[in-house]
Each structure stands twice: as structure tokens, then as C-alpha cells.
Image (tube, rainbow, N blue to C red):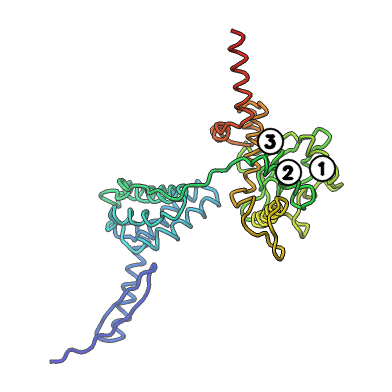
């Protein structure tokens, strides 16, 4: 006897495709509706049968939303949406094995070490809390290993030649003041972008750092108490700022080509042009307005190199590390120490002379 063909009803839930078969279309539709209801109930009910996607969201709402800021919450949510749900979101909690989590992590090798560490920590926290809530008999994240990622490029101080070219280009280029505020005062790009004349005291040659540009384009207080600081303005910069000073205390010190506040993308674009001008000043050939390789100044020269240089200049000038920490706005002296351990030639020479003088005096 020939079997009658079954009707199939399909639907998608949490990124996974489900197929339900029955004798008729009506029965298939009813079974599909029941299956969807069961899945949705499983999503909302906290149990070992709930999906990883559902528990991840529950963990985020319960354990993170009350204690982290909006920016960090969005960052964690992004990790869950971008990495965890696409990989294991449709699995039930009880079915997740260490191998599933290790495979997820192993696929992140193109990301930086710091970003992989962040994802690794989030995964461990999600499954640790599931285990603590008796949703798992064993914690599958307990033995997973964090793979290595791309190493973060170390920031460096500018060379003597780069300093010479920087000062030459800064004399005429519109972005010169922005760059010099980083070189001579150690401000972060976000702090320069938000700096207003009210906070530039040219009578006493002090910059009061009180606000910074945020990632969403708004301006608010520095993210840590250490960010609030006073920084001396050296004479080489004070004269330039005096010429540019506005009568409006709330006007921006540095503005983009439209006369508005820089954004993170626009000050990076500004510096690309600045670096291009440095290459021209270095004698690189130009064709149709474009500098041609080989370049005298490469992409490894970034805006942050100038802030790094300010810190090494402090070291060369004999400024104690605890004072340098305050001037840099570092929340921890260990951050300053990472730069101070890269001794400058001037600091090395001064140390050698001091040791020599001491030995002769014995």
C-alpha cells in the first residue's frame, strides 16, 4: 500500500531552522505552532533545557545590566550577538561541551589578544553562573584555553627626524596645533578635540583638562579621576596659542575644516594628511598630488606616538615618574612605568654621567 506524502511546515527560531511533518498542512501548522511555543517557553524558563542564546541574554540582564555602564553593557551584548549566539546559541545548555567552546575561541585568531581575552572572560562568566545556578552538572568552560591573537602594536616615541619634520609641517598646516598639544602637553586626541579656550590659562601657562570626546561623538568628563589634571604649557607652544586665542572662552581650540569639533574619524583623517605633508617635506616624490613610495614617514607614526613622546621627554627632563603619572593622566603608575622602562638616550646619558660622578667622588 502506497504511503501518503507528509506535509512539512518550517520555521526559524533563534537562528535555527526547524522542520515539522504531519499528514496534512493543517496538522503540520498546528504541530509547528506547538513546537514554537515549547521553544519559546524553554527560552523564558530557566532550566537545563534552555538555549545558550536565552541563558546568555538572561545572564546579561541579571548579572551585568545592574552593575556596568551603558557602554560596557553594549560591548558585552555585541560579543554575545557576534560570536556566542552564531556559534552555539541554538544549543541547549546541557549539550554544550568544552570542545564546542574551544572551537569557538580557536576561530578568533585574527583578533587581538586583548579582544580574545574579553570574549574568553565573557564565555567563562556565562557558563560559571549557569553552573552556580545548577543548570549544568559540569562547567564546560572550566578547562578551555585562551588562544593567542594578534599582538597589539607597541606605541613608540617619534625619532629626531620625525620631530624635525613635525615642527616644520606644524608651522603651516591647519592640524599643527592639534599635534603640538599632544607633543608638548601629552593630551590624548579625545582631550584635544574637546579642549576649549576657557580651559587654557595663558597667563599662568596651564591647560586644565576637564573633558574629553566620547566614542559616540559627545563630550563629557574624563572616564577616570586621573583624567582631571593640570598640565604646564611650555614656552614653545604658549606663543602659538596666544596668537590663536579666541575671545569666546567656550570656543574650541582645535576645529575641523568645517569649523566644528573633531570626531575620532576626522582627527585621524587630519593626521593622515599631516603625515602626507611630512613625507613631502622629507623630499618624497609627488605625482598628481599624491606622495609616491618609498615613504620617509610610514603608517607606524600615529597620533598617539606624540603622547608617548611627551612621556619619554618627561623622563629625559628628569621628571619623577610619580609626577609624570599625574601629567599623563594615568590611573596607574604601572602604565607610566611601561613607558619609562624604555629609556631615552638622554636619560641613559644622564644616568651614566651621574654614576661616573659618584664613582669619582668615592
- As drawn, is 50 to the left or to the right of 253? left
Task: Identify the residue position indicated by label 1 in the image.
Answer: 240
Question: Could you classify mark 1 by the number of other residues whose Cα lies within 10 Å: few (under 14), some (14-19), or many (20 or more)?
Answer: few
SS assignment at label 2: helix
Cα distance between the residues tagged 2 and 3:
18 Å
| Disc on res. 180 | 2
The answer to whether residue 136 is above or below residue 27 is: above
User: Which quadrant, please, contains the N terminus?
Assistant: bottom left
Ranked by sequence position, the earlier of labels 3 and 1 is: 3
* Residue 43: image location, x then y, percent: 36, 62
Ranked by sequence position, the earlier of labels 2 and 3 is: 2
Question: Could you classify mark 2 by the number of other residues whose Cα lies within 10 Å: few (under 14), some (14-19), or many (20 or more)?
Answer: many
SS assignment at label 3: strand
Q: Circles 3 and 1: CB distance less than 8 Å?
A: no
Q: Circles 2 and 1: CB distance less than 8 Å?
A: yes
Cα distance between the residues tagged 2 and 1:
10 Å
Task: Identify the residue position indicated by label 3 in the image.
Answer: 229
SS assignment at label 1: helix
Q: Which residue is depicted at the point 38% across and 60% down? A: 53
Cα distance between the residues tagged 3 and 1:
22 Å
The answer to whether residue 342 is above or below residue 130 is: above
Q: Which residue is depicted at the point 66% across and 47% down? A: 189
Amino acid at each position: 500500500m502506497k504511503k501518503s506524502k507528509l506535509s512539512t511546515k518550517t520555521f526559524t527560531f533563534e537562528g535555527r531552522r526547524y522542520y515539522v511533518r504531519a499528514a496534512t498542512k493543517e496538522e503540520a501548522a498546528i504541530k509547528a505552532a506547538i513546537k514554537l511555543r515549547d521553544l519559546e517557553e524553554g527560552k523564558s524558563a530557566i532550566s537545563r533545557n534552555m538555549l545558550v542564546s536565552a541563558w546568555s541574554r538572561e545572564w546579561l540582564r541579571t548579572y551585568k545590566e545592574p552593575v556596568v555602564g551603558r557602554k560596557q553593557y553594549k560591548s558585552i551584548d555585541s560579543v554575545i550577538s557576534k560570536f556566542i549566539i552564531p556559534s552555539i546559541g541554538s544549543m541547549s545548555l546541557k549539550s554544550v561541551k568544552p570542545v564546542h567552546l574551544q572551537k569557538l575561541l580557536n576561530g578568533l585568531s585574527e583578533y587581538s589578544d586583548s579582544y580574545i581575552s574579553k570574549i574568553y572572560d565573557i564565555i567563562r562568566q556565562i557558563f560559571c553562573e549557569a553552573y552556580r545556578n545548577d543548570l549544568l552538572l559540569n562547567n564546560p568552560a572550566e578547562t578551555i584555553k585562551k588562544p593567542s591573537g594578534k599582538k597589539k602594536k607597541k606605541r613608540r616615541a617619534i625619532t629626531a627626524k620625525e620631530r624635525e619634520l613635525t615642527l616644520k609641517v606644524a608651522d603651516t598646516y591647519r592640524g599643527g596645533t592639534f599635534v603640538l598639544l599632544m607633543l608638548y602637553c601629552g593630551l590624548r586626541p579625545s582631550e584635544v578635540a574637546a579642549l576649549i579656550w576657557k580651559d587654557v590659562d595663558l597667563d599662568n601657562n596651564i591647560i586644565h583638562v576637564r573633558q574629553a570626546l566620547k566614542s559616540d561623538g559627545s563630550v563629557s568628563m574624563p572616564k577616570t579621576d586621573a583624567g582631571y589634571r593640570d598640565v604646564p604649557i611650555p614656552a614653545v607652544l604658549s606663543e602659538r596659542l596666544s596668537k590663536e586665542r579666541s575671545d569666546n572662552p567656550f570656543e574650541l581650540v582645535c576645529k575641523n575644516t568645517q569649523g566644528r569639533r573633531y570626531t575620532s574619524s576626522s582627527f585621524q583623517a587630519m593626521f593622515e594628511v599631516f603625515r602626507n605633508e611630512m613625507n613631502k617635506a622629507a623630499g618624497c616624490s609627488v605625482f598628481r598630488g599624491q606622495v609616491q613610495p618609498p615613504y620617509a614617514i610610514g603608517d607606524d607614526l600615529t597620533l598617539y606616538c606624540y603622547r608617548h613622546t611627551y612621556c619619554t621627554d618627561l623622563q629625559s627632563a628628569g621628571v619623577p615618574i610619580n609626577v609624570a603619572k599625574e601629567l599623563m593622566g594615568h590611573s596607574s603608575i604601572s602604565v607610566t612605568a611601561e613607558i619609562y622602562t624604555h629609556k631615552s638616550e638622554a636619560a641613559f646619558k644622564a644616568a651614566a654621567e651621574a654614576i661616573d660622578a659618584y664613582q669619582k667622588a668615592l
